[in-house]
Image (spheres, grey):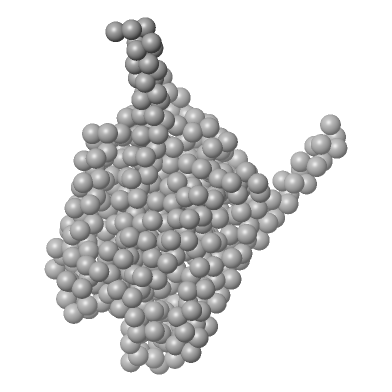
Amino acid sequence: MSKNNLLFTHHSSLITHHLFMNRSPLLVIFVTVFIDLIGFGIVIPVLPFYVEGTKFNATPRTVGLLFASYSVMQLIFTPVLGRLSDRYGRRPVLFLSLLGTSAGFFILGFATTLWMLFAGRIIDGITGGNISTAQAYIADVTTEENRAKGMGMIGAAFGLGFIFGPAIGGILSQWGTHVPFLFAGGLALANATLLYFVLPETVTPDHPARVSAATGRWSQLLAALRQTRLAFVLTIYFLFITAFSIMTSTFGLFTMYRFGYDAHDTGWLFVFVGVIGAIIQGGLINRLVKIFGEWPLVITGALLFALSLFAIPWTGPHTGLLALLAVGGTFAVGNSLATPSLTTLASKSAGAGEQGGVLGVTQSVASLARTVGPSISAALIYSGALTLGADQKPHNMSDHSVATTFWAAAAIMFVAFLLALYFARSRASEYRDATATA
């Protein structure tokens, strides 16, 4: 073999190694989160119809509690899984969490009683720490300058999950509302198999995360959580996800009550929202962060989200589908601007040794919000309907309970907007004072 051929072979191997180490892991993480979010997207529009069917005959309050049971388990176990990923690696935690998701969906699909429904959601919740672990993986392989792009990739997976998940759920529900859950279980099992064979580990024996976790340095994690910036980020994130979960747990019931839509119709509405989210988070968010910074995007996103929630009760057959799409589009833009920006800010608040723990706590805060949100929506819809004597109306809903529920979510989101605005301005003031002193 000639010298030139040897050089070419050497350079080719280096390029292949570079592509595998820097591109392939992120691609696998993207596929992992995408497939996982397809299952999440299937649940949102289909679950209310599934549990309110003749087999279970559940009330709206039960629907809210079912959503909340999943989130309670995530609240408890996500920080634990995040810290375990610091100590034992991202790959085994991701693998086991996907197996748990698969088992939870299969139990949900084969359920014959309400307790089986709750068992399926609880099992999925216990092992559902894969999003924070995936975020920690991205933090391992990206710099702070490109962190928003990596977190935006997870946001894009969320968006695409909302495109394909609700569409798949709506289509498959025509053969039975249990069928989408069986499909999601099989998909999660295939996802776990893919991850097991192709995802390299990032937490090496000398990685700061493993060193910190192995020596029991929870104090480092606690010190990171005491930071003012992280406290604001977690508070705003909690309010954001609370409002988001009120919307998602109620939207299917709302379209069924106000527009007469079924799971198939509602699924396509989430497809529309997902397309917008994928475009912004997959292609635009990194450029926007570099131009404006994370906090302006959080502020703008929170305001748009609040406005969209406030407008939902005004939509109906009299305004037409176009108004509902406009509200959904505004919500999608607001969510896509703020969510990856918040997770990026949380990641930047911690060192390399605390990524799994801090991002686990971040997702635990989200799980708490997903517990509070559906509980609020279930209570407002149920009590609002009874107050007006509307319990004979379909799904125990009324115009008053719809307005109360979505306006409560809008108020929560507006508080998040004010907090983000206050913190951004106070930080700008501190920066100006420090510059003047210097």
Count of numbered circles in the view: 0
Instruction: Place residue 262 in its image quadrant.
Output: bottom left
Query: Left of 431 or right of it: where is 160?
Result: left
Q: Residue at x 38, y 65 (%)?
A: 271
Quadrant for the N terminus in the image: top left
- Tell me the quarter of the picture where residue 95 sits: top left
Q: Is residue 105 above or below residue 316?
A: above
Vertical placement of 245 versus 315: above or below? Answer: above
In the visual, does 41 lie left or right of 359?
left
Picture residue at 45% right of the left edge, 46% below the top = 153
Q: Position of residue 164 (x, y in %)?
A: 33, 60
Q: Position of residue 191 (x, y in %)?
A: 25, 45
Tell me the quarter of the picture where residue 72 sits.
bottom left
Q: Is residue 29 left or right of residue 183?
A: right
| Residue at the spot 63% in from the left edge and 50% down from the top edge | 295
Would you say residue 197 is visible in this rendering? yes
Res 69 seen here: no
Name the quadrant of the C terminus. Answer: top right
Q: Nearer the viewer, residue 269 or 64?
A: 269
User: Which residue is depicted at the point 24% across and 40% down?
Assistant: 194
- Whole-percent x, y for residue 56 in the image: 20, 75
Give the vertical position of 415 relative to 210 (above or below): below
- Is 428 placed left or right of 395 in the picture? right
Residue 27: image location, x then y, percent: 37, 40
Nearest to the observer: residue 379 or residue 10: 10
